[in-house]
Image: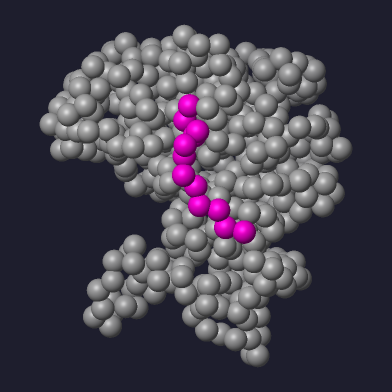
């Protein structure tokens, strides 16, 4: 993709011949504005962080809107600085957010309980009951697991729930008045089926449970309406425009595409939406998505079945923990440098420490780490304790320390992926990587290739992430109104036809080293269990 000259870009922006994607991720909210050739024209960003309150990982709704407004303001300022024009409209808009979780509202639109994010592992009882009932894996973070756990807990608010949605669905509702959701995000609320809607048979099973528990509603009355990529999903209202841009510059009437989850936008951003393709997104959490040609032979508690934004079934291995603990260690090293009077930028610090990991022993010198800032369902932990362990004889070097923590970031993911590659014999030709784990060139790719023993590719556009993927979905809605073209063909033939990518093959030495680390990792899970038990509160 080639950059558009600034004079042409200014005219595109003035005329609204653009698309805007906004994604509310775990640690930042990002907006990307693209032109008709899919090239990013401008971007905005706002850093934020979840809160841990009363045993719940949450974000306040006030934080959602303050963050969205700050992100949009950053975008507006970037447009003005680059092109000297005001951002008053766009051709299409799309909202993406962290998948799953629990946002429950009453008939007046009031939030009934604190937003329970994907990071919570507090629904084990509900997830187990529903998985057995449906014979379909219902992860703890799914919306229906949170709802049923609230029923099991006897929480007073559940009888008053009138609308249940995800973060992207909530923001879209406020901007447009439409209670809808893209199928990829919807498939993380409740199972979907080949009709491209919620599974009718399983809805009936759940409703029988809810009726026996005295609930006054049926689940289908609470859930947002399901849409697929390319369908229109409402327009920006006057109130929605002011919510996003209090300055008054942004005009209402902009068409919106279906809101999607971050897994779906990751698939789009890496051109991994067709059967036999796959991608892995690694940042605060890490998840791998494999678009299936056939159904799995059985359900696995470690593997979610969701869909692409077009509705194709996807096997998803999701680990709650990836880089948070590693980031904390890098921050500590930065603090030590500052105490010594050294001045190193955060970017340079990450770059040098990540690269140092490639100089370590293949198996990280016998070191062991667990990055469990939160609970980890794949290894059956409801709580986490970040942990570093070594033997007296271990090779305790900085290179091995960094390598061990990069390995640990993928430990739980590896356990889930082995179920698909070994038990289900799913063949992987290549995985597309994106997210902060891959920001330092080649390092994250080499580590991921060692973990999965498969080539890992990163595109030049990977740094734009899910917000760019959401902008592509907004563009596809415009395109689909004029051309009967599938999302797969649109991406393959128009967006990524000439996209440059960098592929790293797995190194046999690295693969053997990661396998040795994983032997320690599996044996040492009892150490992590003891830490959780010993350090309560």
**Numbered label tally:** 0
| Residue farthest to the left, as pictured | 84
Q: Is residue 179 left or right of residue 369?
A: left
Q: Is residue 109 left or right of residue 192?
A: left
- Compared with 289, 381 (above or below) is below
Q: Residue, x 69% and y 68% (percent of image)? A: 508
Q: Which residues are magenta?
A: 494-505
| Residue farthest to the front, as pictured | 498
Which x, y percent locates residue 383?
Answer: 62, 56
Which x, y percent locates residue 366?
Answer: 66, 80
- Compared with 314, 186 (above or below) is above
Q: Residue, x 60% and y 86% (percent of image)? A: 395
Quarter of the image with the N terminus is top left
Classify residue 5 by image quadrant. Answer: top left
Q: Magenta includes 309?
A: no
* Residue 43 can be seen, yes or no: yes
- Compared with 347, 430 (above or below) is above
Q: Residue, x 34% and y 30% (percent of image)? A: 34
- Compared with 21, 426 (above or below) is below
Q: Residue, x 42% and y 22% (percent of image)? A: 475
Its colouring scheme is one colour
Front residue of this view, candidates 418 and 100: 418
Front residue of this view, candidates 192 and 424: 424
* Residue 112 can be seen, yes or no: no
Which x, y percent locates residue 443?
Answer: 50, 63
Quarter of the image with the C terminus is bottom right
Which x, y percent locates residue 152?
Answer: 71, 34
């Amino acid at each position: 993709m080639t950059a558009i000259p600034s004079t042409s870009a200014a005219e595109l922006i003035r005329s609204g011949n653009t698309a805007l994607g906004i994604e509310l991720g775990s640690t930042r909210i990002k907006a990307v504005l693209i032109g008709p050739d899919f090239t990013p024209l401008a971007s905005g960003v706002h850093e934020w962080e979840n809160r841990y309150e009363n045993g719940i990982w949450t974000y306040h709704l006030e934080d959602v809107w303050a963050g969205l407004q700050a992100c949009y303001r950053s975008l507006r300022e970037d447009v003005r600085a680059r092109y000297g024009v005001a951002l008053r409209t766009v051709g299409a808009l799309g909202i993406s957010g962290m998948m799953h979780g629990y946002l429950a509202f009453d008939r007046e639109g009031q939030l009934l309980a604190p937003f329970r994010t994907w990071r919570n592992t507090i629904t084990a009882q509900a997830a187990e009951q529903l998985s057995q009932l449906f014979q379909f894996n219902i992860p703890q973070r799914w919306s229906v697991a949170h709802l049923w756990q609230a029923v099991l807990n006897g929480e007073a608010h559940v009888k008053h729930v009138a609308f249940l949605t995800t973060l992207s669905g909530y923001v879209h509702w406020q901007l447009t008045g439409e209670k809808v959701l893209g199928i990829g995000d919807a498939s993380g609320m409740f199972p979907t089926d080949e009709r491209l809607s919620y599974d009718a048979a399983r809805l009936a099973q759940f409703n029988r449970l809810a009726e026996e528990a005295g609930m006054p509603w049926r689940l289908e009355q609470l859930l947002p309406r399901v849409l697929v990529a390319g369908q229109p999903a409402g327009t920006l209202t006057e109130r929605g425009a002011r919510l996003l841009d209090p300055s008054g510059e942004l005009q209402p009437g902009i068409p919106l595409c279906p809101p999607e989850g971050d897994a779906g936008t990751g698939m789009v951003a890496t051109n991994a939406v067709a059967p036999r393709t796959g991608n892995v997104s690694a940042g605060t959490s890490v998840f791998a998505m494999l678009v299936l040609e056939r159904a799995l032979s059985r359900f696995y508690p470690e593997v979610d079945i969701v869909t692409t934004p077009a509705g194709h079934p996807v096997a998803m291995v999701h680990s709650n923990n990836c880089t948070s603990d590693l980031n904390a260690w890098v921050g500590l090293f930065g603090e030590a440098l500052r105490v010594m009077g050294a001045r190193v930028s955060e970017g340079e610090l990450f770059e040098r420490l990540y690269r140092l990991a490639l100089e370590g022993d293949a198996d990280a010198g016998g070191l062991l780490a667990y990055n469990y800032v939160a609970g980890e369902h794949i290894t059956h932990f409801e709580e986490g304790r970040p942990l570093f362990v070594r033997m007296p004889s271990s090779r305790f070097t900085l290179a091995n320390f960094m390598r061990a923590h990069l390995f640990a970031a993928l430990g739980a993911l590896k356990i889930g992926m082995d179920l698909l590659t070994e038990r289900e014999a799913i063949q992987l030709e290549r995985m597309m990587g994106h997210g902060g784990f891959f920001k330092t060139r080649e390092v994250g790719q080499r580590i991921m290739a060692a973990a999965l023993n498969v080539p890992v590719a990163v595109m030049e556009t990977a740094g734009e992430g899910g917000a760019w993927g959401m902008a592509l979905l907004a563009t596809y809605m415009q395109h689909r109104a004029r051309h009967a073209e599938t999302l797969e063909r649109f991406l393959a033939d128009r967006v990524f036809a000439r996209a440059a990518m960098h592929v790293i093959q797995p190194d046999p030495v690295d693969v053997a080293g990661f396998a040795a680390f994983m032997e320690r990792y599996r044996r040492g899970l009892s150490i992590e269990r003891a830490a959780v038990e010993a350090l309560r509160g």
